[in-house]
Image (spheres, rainbow, N blue to C red):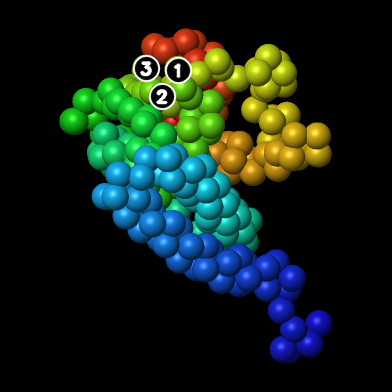
Amino acid sequence: MGANDIRFTDFLASVIHDMKNSLNMQIDGLEQVAAECRSAGNEVLCERLGPLIYEASRMDFNLIQLLSVYKIDNSIYPMDVSEQPVREVIEEAIVQNTSMMALRGIRIEVECAPDEYWYFDRDLIKGVLVNALNNAYKYTRDRIRVVGRVDGEFLEIRVEDNGSGYPPGMLRDGISQNRRSNFTTGSTGLGFYFSSLVARMHANSGRRGELAIENGGAYGGSCFVVRLP
């Protein structure tokens, strides 16, 4: 490799970053149009814009996940585990999804004590929550519940919805299999891979973070659960 050559992964990371910037401009434009439609009382067009904003936001977040995985894989991610206000981090993740949730009339409830604190990397865990909310958007009918609580020696954060729940095959296969690409459904498994990676990066006294999916919760739908030691 010559002095001016770069690795393909470095080149790909640069391209992804450029794509993400362009996509952000498109999302901003769509949200401005949606706001104008609401002001004009055009609810039909607002409803049509909702899925477009969701898909654009989902792709933008996928690119962020790819860049994060690239940095982690190359040992250049600035991991910063420090004491964090759990409810505040949850609310920051929700704010990133406010526009698309509102367009579908989805109500989000938070159950977490304001004085609940835990040690974790704020940006990474917020990314896991944004991913979970994106999944809940897809499964829910109209309600999402985010719970943050200490359970023994772990912080447990749950994202629950009132949809029909995860398909039996996803529950049977578990997180490890759902991290794989599925050419039948078109799923890349990136969201589960990223979230599992982030959970495992959090370790304390020989215990590592873990990820789980289940059905039930307060609404009887799907539940995305991350537990941090």
Q: Going from the N terminus, do you reach mark 1 or mark 2 first?
A: 2
Q: Residue at x 73, y 89 (%)?
A: 3
Question: In this rendering, would 179 be left or right of 69?
Answer: right
Say which quadrant the N terminus sits in: bottom right
In the picture of the structure, the residue carrying the numbered disc 2 is 142
Labels 1, 3: front one: 1
Instruction: Say what amino acid the circle numbered 3 marks.
Output: Gly
To which quarter of the image does residue 192 belong? top right
To which quarter of the image does residue 189 belong? top right
Instruction: Say what amino acid the circle numbered 2 marks.
Output: Asp
In the picture of the structure, the residue carrying the numbered disc 1 is 162
Across and down, in percent, residue 44 comes to 42, 40
CA distance for labels 3 and 2? 32 Å
Q: Which of the numbered marks, if any, corresponds to residue 152? A: 3
Q: Going from the N terminus, do you reach mark 3 or mark 2 first?
A: 2
* Element class at badge 3: loop
Instruction: Say what amino acid the circle numbered 1 marks.
Output: Asn
